[in-house]
Image (cartoon, grey):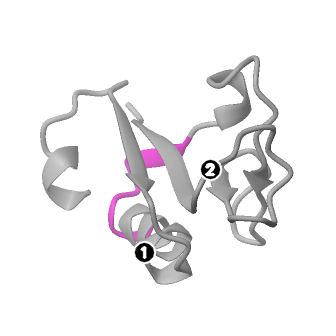
Amino acid sequence: LDTASNYLKIGGRLVYSTCSTEPEENEEAVSRFLEKHPDFELEDLSKSIKGRKLPVYESGQHNQNKFIQILPGLSNSDLDLDGFFMAKMIRKG
């Protein structure tokens, strides 16, 4: 994330995705990145992904619709997926 962020202009978007279900590789990694990079903020993913019912991760630190976390056998997705995590950040001006 740190390296990729160096190549983004203001308004540029950075998508972070893993096939992990481990918090330290997912929401904790994003939280650490955002703490070090106050010029980035999470985007609302519900506006980006349309036409599918995807489970959205809620965290006490971030608002609803900021992460997508799919847990095999536990998520209410209409897709048959393995573990998956995604967050989208934008570089602020």
> What percent of the width, then of the height, locates residue 33?
37, 65
Mark 2 crowdedness (10 Å alpha carbons): few <14, some 14-19, many ≥20? few
Q: Amino acid at mark 1?
A: Glu
Q: Front-most of 60 and 22?
A: 22
- Secondary structure under tag 1 reads helix
- Give the number of callouts: 2
Residue found 78% across the figure and 72% down from its top: 60
The label number, if any, that marks residue 81 in the structure image: 2
Q: Which residues are magenta?
A: 35-42
Mark 1 crowdedness (10 Å alpha carbons): few <14, some 14-19, many ≥20? some
Q: Front-most of 53 and 37?
A: 53
> What percent of the width, then of the height, locates residue 30?
45, 64
> Sequence order check: which comes first, mark 1 or mark 2?
1
Mark 1 touches mark 2? (CB < 8 Å): no
Left/right placement of residue 37 relative to residue 79 reads left
Residue found 49% across the figure and 41% down from its top: 88
Q: Front-most of 34 and 4?
A: 4
Residue found 30% across the figure and 27% down from its top: 10
- Secondary structure under tag 2 reads loop
Quadrant in which the N terminus is drawn: bottom left
**Residue 86 included in the magenta stretch of the image:** no
Q: In which image quadrant can residue 57 be found?
A: bottom right
